Image (cartoon, rainbow, N blue to C red):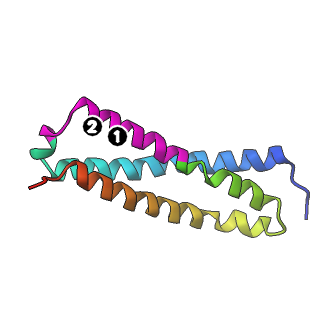
Amino acid sequence: MSVITFREAASNAVRFWERARVAYNLVLATIVVGYFIAGLPLSKEQITFDLALGLFLLAVLANVAFCAAYPIDIFAQFTSFNAHWLRVRWTVLAVGVLFAAVITRFIVMGMFTSAT
C-alpha cells in the first residue's frame, strides 16, 4: 500500500467530483425545465424577477451541498479502504444526485403548478 499525500487525495477528489458536478447540474436543470414545460402556459405567467432569484439561490445551495462529498472523499482516500473507495465512490454520487433530484422535484412542483 502506497502512502498518499493530501495534495494527491485532494487532486483526485477534484478531478472526480468536478466532472460529476456537470452531470449533477444537468440532471437538476432538466427537472426544472421539464416541470416548466409541463406547466405551460401557466408556468410562463409565474416567471418573475423574484422567482429567478429564488432559482439562482437554490442552484447555488445545491452546489454547496454537492461540496459535502469532498471531505468524505479525501478522508476515505487516507484509509486502508482507499482502493475500494476509488472503485465505489460513484455510488455516493448516484445517491446524492437522486436525493437532490427528489428535493428539486418537490420544490419545482410548488413553483410551476397551480394553487387552485
Image location of residue 91, percent across then percent down: 58, 67
Give residue 80's quadrant in the image. bottom right
Which circle marks residue 101 in the picture? none
Magenta residues span 44-64
Q: Mark 1 points at which residue?
A: 55
Image location of residue 16, percent across then percent down: 64, 51
**Relative to 10, is 94 above or below?**
below
Report the side of 114 relative to 65 (left or right): left
Amino acid at circle 2? Leu
Helix, strand or loop at label 2? It is: helix
Q: Which residue is drawn at 71% across and 63% down?
A: 86
Helix, strand or loop at label 1? It is: helix
Categorize mark 2 by other alpha carbons within 10 Å: few (<14), some (14-19), many (20+): few
Q: Which image quarter holds the C terminus?
A: bottom left
Amino acid at circle 1? Leu
Contact between labelled residues 2 and 1, with CB atoms less than 8 Å apart: yes
Q: Which image quarter holds the N terminus?
A: bottom right
Q: Residue at x 47, y 59 (%)?
A: 97
Q: Name the residue under label 2.
A: 51
